[in-house]
Amino acid sequence: MKQNVAHKFGKGLTPRQFVESMTKNQRDFESWYEKFTWEDESEKEYFESLNHRDDLRVLILAADWCGDVVRNVPAVFRILDTAGMKTEVFILEENLDLMDDFLTMGGRSVPVVIFADTGGYVLGHWGPRPEHVQSIMREFKRENPDREAADYDSKIAEARKAMGQAYGEGTEYQTVIAKELRSLISGF
């Protein structure tokens, strides 16, 4: 049976309300939002073509303290706005019931972008980060399953540094997010 999130519809924040409620990283979030550009015009056209679809709803699990939220959600907001998709944001700490249905490798990682139909049935989800960045964390977790190991903290610091390098200095990763979301949505 498909998971259903209809009970959450209408209970989240609008993207603007989320940004306005941020107590951490708001300036960085808005900076990434302003930097967003469509590098591939065909990607923009694809998302614009979704404006006629009123059968999709998007729920985003987020937290303003999370670096991946600050980097990725601005691009997701811009992409979903272009697509005209109804989007609600849910704060991780206030929505553990929803979060625990979308764990990443057993952990509460955000953002999670959940796509559902108008009946609330989950069609798919994306997150917490682009695949080329997430693969670094997956490899780290595979090689370091013991969080109590003496060198765990130093190794996760190395993995986080590598993930930062994988994101890069510019906005190229935003184009990757658009491609990944397009691939996901194309299956609905």
Image: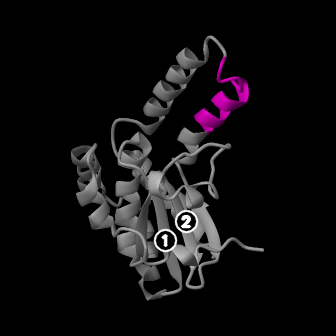
Is residue 187 visible in the rendered image? The answer is no
Q: Position of residue 15 (x, y in %)?
A: 33, 66
Does 49 appear above or below 111? below
The amino acid on which the numbered mark 2 sits, given as a three-letter code, is Ile
Residue 134 percent across, percent down from the top left: 57, 41
Q: CA distance from mark 2 to mark 1?
A: 6 Å
Q: Give yes or no for residue 142 being in the magenta stretch.
A: yes
The residue sitting at the top extreme is 150
The answer to whether any part of residue 3 appears in the image is yes
Task: Indicate the quadrant containing the N terminus: top left, top right, bottom left or bottom right.
Answer: bottom right
Q: Is residue 42 above or below residue 157?
A: below
Which element is circle 2 on? strand
Q: Nearer the viewer, residue 89 or 139?
A: 89
Q: Residue at x 52, y 20 (%)?
A: 158
Q: Is residue 85 above or below residue 21?
A: below
User: As drawn, is 60 to the left or to the right of 143?
Assistant: left
Q: Which residue is farthest right?
A: 1
Residue for point 59% across, 33% down? 136
Helix, strand or loop: magenta stretch:
helix
- Residue 153, located in which quarter of the rendered image? top right
Mark 2 — residue? 114
Q: Which residues are magenta?
A: 135-148
Q: Residue at x 60, y 18 (%)?
A: 152
